[in-house]
Amino acid sequence: MLLIGSHVGFNSKDQLVGSLNQALSYGANTFMFYTGAPQNTIRSKINDKLTKEALEIMNKNNIELTNIIVHAPYIINLANNKEDDKYNFSIRFLKEEIGRCKQIGIKYLVLHPGSHVGVGVEDGLKSIIFAINQVNKTNDSVIVLLETMAGKGTELGTNFEQLKTIIDGVVDKDKIGICMDTCHLNDAGFDVSNFDKILDEFDSIIGLNYLHCIHINDSKNPIGAHKDRHENIGYGTIGFNNLINIIYNERLDNIPKILETPWIGDYPPYKEEIEMIKNKEFNSKLK
């Protein structure tokens, strides 16, 4: 089954109901949201009444809550423990995000592994492992999905070996997984035109059973640029046909696929991009 959707908003007034209605307006059957702005700590209290209302609408539209994704804010950095206050804040805020996911009933929380900012790759990976193990002491239901990264600056998670190291160090393997990002893979140096080869490599190093979400983005950059600049579907260096082949790869069936493509002016083009994907036909007039 094709599970296709996009990033949607989540505001204090409508919360999950608003997110769901936005996704439905795009023709989506999955979606991803932040529980607040990704750049700050401001969060509204989860309204259980609105969550219940959203679940009723989901049921009528055959949308499973287990296919809905939350993305952790960018301000969380588990890879650098040089400053105790900042490191402990990241651990504490990730625990709080997991608590919000649990209250809503969300199964998957996508997390950028973090940037080591000078402590080095080895120590950075150790810091991530320690933090996730601390978080999981009070986490009994939410699976943290480490996102594959482009390698900008001192980002970690830019290759499967680093992600494997983190997974190996996490005590509770049932609470850890991976989210692939097509733009990030391209910018990290992976040739996504041969995605089965990437999946083979991933399976041999990590295991496809750990893959639970895919961010579908074209890239403004050539392969290996390490820049992380998303482009609209079919308008970048990855190309429409390559992305369609990824989306419809049988090995990725029933894995939520989420668009994080740029707005065109002040307009989110997700409805048109989802139509392109469903029809397998590129819209050259999108922008």
Image (spheres, helix red, strand yellow):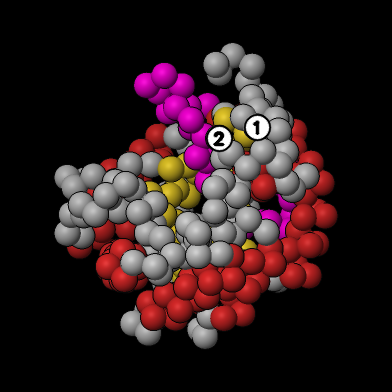
Q: x, y percentage for residue 73?
A: 36, 53
Residue in the picture at 56% in, 64% down:
120
Q: Is residue 279 left or right of residue 137?
A: right
Above or below: residue 154 compared with residue 285: below
Q: Circle 1 is placed at which residue position?
A: 221
* Disc number for residue 70: none
Q: x, y percentage for residue 103?
A: 27, 68
* Disc number for residue 229: 2
Residue in the picture at 50% in, 59% down:
118
The quarter holding residue 165 reads: bottom right
Amino acid type for the residue under numbered disc 1: Asn
Instruction: Return the residue nearer the eye: 178 or 118.
Output: 118
Name the secondary structure under disc 2: loop
Q: Is residue 58 visible?
A: no
Amino acid type for the residue under numbered disc 2: Arg
Name the secondary structure under disc 1: loop
First to last magenta residue range: 243-272
The quarter holding residue 166 reads: bottom right
Disc 2 and disc 1 in contact, CB within 8 angstroms: yes
Residue in the picture at 37% in, 21% down:
266
Instruction: Return the residue nearer the eye: 187 or 3.
Output: 187
Q: x, y percentage for residue 70?
A: 40, 56
